Amino acid sequence: MKVGLQINRFDFPGGENKIGEHLRLIAQAAEDSGFDSLWVMDHFFQLPGIGVYTDPMLEAYTALGYLAGVTTKVKLGTMVTGVIYREPAVLINAVTTLDVVSGGRAYFGIGAGWNDQEAKALGLLDPLSSKRFIRLEDTLKLALKMWSADFSPFKGEIYDLPEPYLSPQPVSRPHPPILIGGGGEEKTLRFVAQYADACNLFARDMEQLKHKLEVLKDHCVKLGRNYDEIEKTCLAGIDISSAANSKPDTLKAKLDELKSLGVEHVIYANSKDADVSSFDKFSTIVEYIHDLH
């Protein structure tokens, strides 16, 4: 099993002048301790439950470009980009750029979007009234087209591009893995089966997670897709500082259960600003995760 880290807050000690330095230290400590992937949220306001909306929030692809420059091995992606935030060709170019400058380490994390507060405040499309799932499917189709070096006109349900040209092409072959976040059973998980290389679901409720994976499997059967080709990732909250200094039995039991359901990549959303030294202590948990077969 693989393990990732979602960096979901930037209210680091020292204020704005220290954000870059602290982000670098976290990323390098996570990579050195064996983490396989690093993720940032693609939001412009902080989310309820993590902080207040006025807390610092970095633009996702600028932050990932910086992380690409201070790391060498970890995969990088958004967890996940709301399709309403950027024009699709611009988004695909951003993901491609990340893949090129990182030497083929990008994921394309994408979803329908949901946060109407930040969308309305910033003059973006309102996810709740913008045909977001039609936009999502258009974007998925366009990404696969552009990444196959097919620059002929694209006409989707919403988007109409006369010449979707893209150069350079991604380093990843055949393209950066497409990860769709969300558990919507009628549309989102069908899109995973039809277009994606990976899914992302929440790990809060094991019975619900099991059910969502069964729904995904059903979609795969109906579409003739090999279910085993899709990387199953899940997002779980954790305080790495506490976990690194406590008895790991409960955490290991949860990991065993996730593995039994078919999860292949657990991504921890660190609930607090971890002491960077915690990652070295957490490396024994990372080794345990890597040894799960």
Image (cartoon, rainbow, N blue to C red):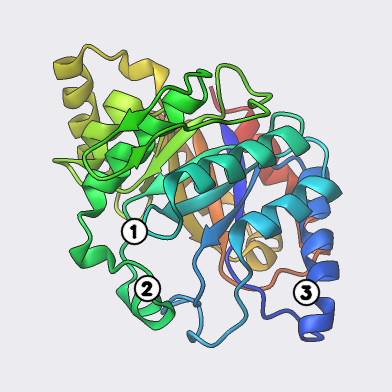
Q: Residue at x 53, y 60 (%)?
A: 41
Q: As shown in the figure, which amino acid type bears the numbered disc 1?
A: Gly
Residue 94 position by quadrant: top right
Residue 113, numbered label:
1
Kindly state the secondary structure of the residue where label 3 is placed. helix
Residue 119, numbered label:
2
Q: As shown in the figure, which amino acid type bears the numbered disc 3?
A: Ile
Image position, residue 45 (x, y; %): 49, 77
Image position, residue 150 (x, y; %): 47, 19
Residue 106 position by quadrant: top right
- Neighbor class of circle 3 (other Cα within 10 Å; few <14, some 14-19, many 20+) is some
Q: Which residue is mark 3?
A: 19
Q: Residue at x 46, y 31 (%)?
A: 163
CA–CA distance in space, label 3 to label 1: 26 Å
Q: Would residue 79 be found to the left or right of residue 208 on screen?
A: right
Of marks 3 and 1, the one in the foreground:
1
Question: Relative to residue 207, is residue 272 depicted above or below?
Answer: below
Does any portion of residue 21 appear in the rendered image? yes
Quick check: marks 2 and 1 in contact, CB under 8 Å? yes
Q: Quadrant of the N terminus?
A: top right
- Mark closer to the chain start, 2 or 1: 1
Of marks 3 and 2, the one in the foreground:
2
CA–CA distance in space, label 3 to label 2: 24 Å
